Image (cartoon, rainbow, N blue to C red):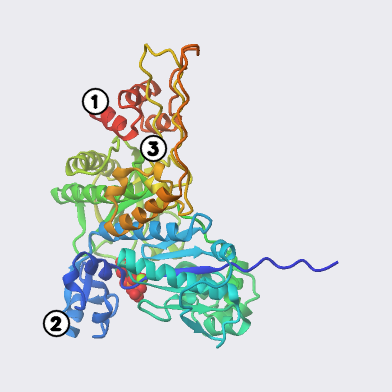
Amino acid sequence: MAARKPPPQRLVLALDCDCFYAQCETRRDPSLAGKPVGVRQKHLVITSNYAARAFGIRKGDSLAEVRRKCPQIVIKDGEDISHYTEVSNAWRAFVANFVGSRCPVEKSGLDELFVDVSAAVDAHGAGGAGEIGHVHGDDVLDDARLASAARLCDRLRQATKRELNLETSAGVSTSKLLAKTVAGLHKPFQQTVLADTPSNRRLVLPDDLPLRKVYGIGHSTAQQLASAGVATVGDLRDFSGPSSISDIERLRALARGDDASQVKQTGAPKSIGAEESFWTRPLQVPSERADEALKLLARKLVRKLAVDQKAHGARPLENVQLSARRAAERSGSPRALTSTLAEGPASAQREKTPGREAKSRPARARVGTLTDDAACEALASKLEADAAALLTALYPHGATLSILNLGVTLKTIDAAGHADISSFLTKRKAPAPRPPPPVPAPVAPPASPGTASTTGIDGAEVDPQTLSELPPEIRADIERQLALWRKTRRPPAKKPRRSSARPAPPPPAVDEAAVAQIVAMGFSRKAAVAALERVNGDVQRAIDGLLASS
Ligand code: TTP
Ligand code: MG
């Protein structure tokens, strides 16, 4: 019997935005183009654009050091990351729309995505326009599918630049590990492809490579391995001794260049938080300063919720959580752990990492549309009150804190999340309007005015309001796809004639998804149905009406 053919290799892109925060700043203020720009958080410049890097500035340099290296640098404040999150969400939606729903897109950081493009490449065959980019290792790229994936990646990156004015770099290979390993080799705005051959694996994972530089091996795992004398890729490959590390086989495989992990479609986040640290001047609780900190945290959290809402729609809150870390005691070492979590039988490992204490409660605040300042302020006040109650419950006798974090968990209405831009744009289905009482004949359900076009966008489902709120670059792209959809759609089906002989119409169907969404926010089913009927099935207006009267 002939041996079974192995399944084709996966084709994976690792995309990374160039100098992300600095690029976002230049996008929103084009007068910065060509100038050296740095972005600061506290006293550190966490990133800078490539014009600044030419002066020797590196990520994490102090502000003083950066000014010394490049006195003319423009420094932007990067404490509020909501704008960067918004750009990141729009980018992810754009990428998902570009590759299509059969290609999973996984968020691995604010400016990093993995995309499995195997389905797109196999559907369209090898070839296509676009550049392959840099070929790492073996001189000749002898793999037509991989070359095709590289061209697709180039087209995607060029479109991202054209439509979103965002420059990205990428690695293209057959696994997340290999793609990620080469993604940063040529930057900015370039890409690198790596064929999966034994010599290439050795090249990107040399024996002396420290384990913390291997994708998939986290900081604490690298520390655990180091304590067993395993510090490099070579050590791990040869390691045969017993290990208490649970997934040692996976780690050994990574050292050989084998990464079986799939690219997983990222859905809407389950929780969102905002954090402040008080290292230099710890926070006494209770105090006016602590009240002020809670006020700021609640507003920071609401800004993040508003950004999330744009990407995933309004979702009900489940719990509010406050977590904190106590400041180190002055008499002890600066890293001494004083929190109650560490006072138990903590391991030596734990002593190095101060623990957090946390308390949560069910959320009382209901979330409406966070499109204006008044709505945001109303939610922030409620969250601030929750936070104050949690802080008192957590530290009834006072404490001195170095970190304070306020977060919420959110209910997921659509388990699949809004994976691509077409579902992001989709109107919530409204129930059919109630027919006028004296008409005895049935009203046929409205016929779908069109079908999904090859662009993946169904124009009949696109909500004009949502479309108008999108960034102009994405809106332009969607509008182009809508124009195509209008050309290719079928004409609407004709309504059947009314006949007086027909029986009376059934009551209009209730949109159960809309009802469930409102019930999930804590309203009764009866109130949800009544509110939906009042506004002809418009879910958002129904929620707003209920919130206003509650
Ligand atoms: P990176 O991808 O590491 O850096 P970058 O995108 O600025 O530059 P490049 O990829 O071209 O080398 O990080 C992404 C963003 O994360 C970065 O723009 C700022 C933020 N960041 C921090 O908040 N803290 C940090 O310590 C670092 C390194 C980055
Ligand atoms: Mg980056």
Question: What distance separates the C-alpha of mark 2 from that of mark 3?
Answer: 53 Å
Q: Position of residue 201 (x, y in %)?
A: 58, 80
Question: What distance separates the C-alpha of mark 1 from that of mark 2?
Answer: 56 Å
The secondary structure type at the circle numbered 3 is loop
Depth order, front residue of 253/178: 178
The secondary structure type at the circle numbered 1 is helix
Question: What distance separates the C-alpha of mark 1 from that of mark 3?
Answer: 22 Å
Say if residue 430 shows up in the picture. Answer: yes
Who's the residue at 16% across and 71% down the image?
A: 31
Against 435, residue 403 (above or below) is below
Number of residues whose C-alpha sits closer than 10 Å to that of mark 1, classed few (under 14), some (14–19) or many (20 or more): few
Number of residues whose C-alpha sits closer than 10 Å to that of mark 2, classed few (under 14), some (14–19) or many (20 or more): few
User: Which sits earlier in the primary sequence, circle 1 or circle 2?
Assistant: 2
Say if residue 225 shows up in the picture. Answer: no
Residue denoted by label 3: 428
Residue denoted by label 2: 71
| Mark 1 vs mark 2: in front | 1
Who's the residue at 40% across and 66% down the image?
A: 112
Against 507, residue 517 (above or below) is below
Left/right of residue 83 with respect to residue 512 in the rendered view: left
| Mark 2 vs mark 3: in front | 3
The secondary structure type at the circle numbered 2 is loop
Tell me whether circle 1 and circle 2 mark residues in contact (CB < 8 Å): no
Residue denoted by label 1: 549
Tell me whether circle 1 and circle 3 mark residues in contact (CB < 8 Å): no
